[in-house]
Amino acid sequence: MKKLILFYLLSLPLCVRSQEITVTFPDDFDLQENPEYDNWTYQQNTFFTLPLSISFFNDDFVPINQYTFNILYNPEFIQLQTEFIEEINNQDFTDSYNVLSSLSSEQANFGADIYEISPTQALATIFFSNLNGPLTEDKFDNGYAILAYLPFKKINACNKAPLTVTFSDGFIDGQYVNPDQQSVFNINNLFSYESGNVTIQNAFINFNILWADVIQNGNTLQPIINGGTPPYNYEWTDKMDVILSTDSLFTPEISGDYLFYVYDQNNCVYILYISYEQLVNIQELSKFSIYPNPATNHIKVKTNRFYAYDLINLNGRILSSGMFSSDVIINRNKLASGIYFLRLKNETEQIIKKVNFH
């Protein structure tokens, strides 16, 4: 029996030191596709959060007392907000953004130190030490949990290129940036990346970039805005860049070429060049009909003036197109309920009307 117990005790470290813990940033983190992590606010600070998850892939769960790790990022584009990292991981705060709770919401010594390496590179050491005992298995969902949310301020919110946040041991140019933290990731001073029992995944981040399109609704130009950070400001100008209107909708007095500018809260700008043609007059427009509108299953168009159509959603995407002679039935198919635009056109003219599917 003693030999059996001794064998068990000796073999236990071999078991728990296998590659059983994985800490990961999302490798394809697009804030347009994940808006729940963008534009968080705390004490008048606006930022996005980068979730860090942790997973156990066998039955040997390890209660977590403390962890430390280093990350590298480009401070020209983003900056880790260290002053409230503990507060935004509080469960009441994360619940307000309808995201998973963070393990690091416990009462703890939780913070970060920033080391500026160069204008384009900074290292952050993040540390967590629980004051109320270890993080236990009941706080995980099948071995998975959000370990922490890291708040980053957008320094250049208009950047269109992917950004990286990478784990690092901090050994740069022949020395450790932070001599007190030389591990990529360390848990309980027992499990680490260097020991081979912690695996990692770096982050690749894309901002929610401002994008716009303009459709012509009758004789009015109407913008469709996606991305960026509202509220938006608008400018309509002529080709000489003389401002003609700052309203969201614009009805030019004459046919011609115009420029449309939209700015978001971060002063990111999207510019469109528009060729505008005044459309047919009201009497001519009476020569077609669209019914029923609102519709349930389909709409029917009768006209002897137009012979092509596009059905467009609110994002400016063409959902269906077709040619016809004098009338056409446009089936709803699997379109969701809501407002759509129907563009009727011929070689020289077009008209856009709203249609509504119940």
Image: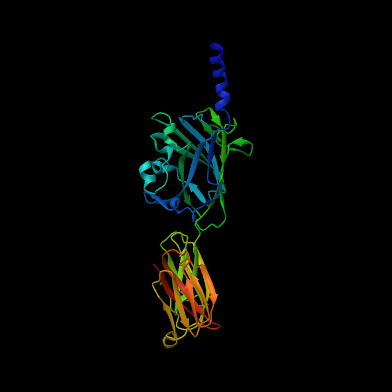
Residue 282 position (above or below residue 230): below
Please state if 316 lies on the left or on the right of 11 as rendered: left
Q: Please give the name of the residue rendered at 44% of the width and 36% of the height, measured from the top-left corner.
A: 140
**Residue 236's spot in the image, x, y percent?**
46, 74
Q: Spot the residue most to the bottom.
A: 283
Q: Please give the name of the residue rendered at 42% of the width and 72% of the height, measured from the top-left corner.
A: 355
**Residue 331's spot in the image, x, y percent?**
48, 70
Instruction: State which quarter of the image contains the C terminus.
Output: bottom left
Q: Please give the name of the residue rendered at 51% of the width and 55% of the height, measured from the top-left corner.
A: 207
Q: Nearer the viewer, residue 195 or 155?
A: 195
Q: Nearer the viewer, residue 147 or 345?
A: 345
Q: Spot the residue most to the right.
A: 174
**Residue 164's spot in the image, x, y percent?**
56, 48
Tag count: 0
| Residue 237 seen anywhere in this rendered image of the structure | no
Residue 154 position (above or below residue 166): below
Q: Nearer the viewer, residue 348 or 232?
A: 348
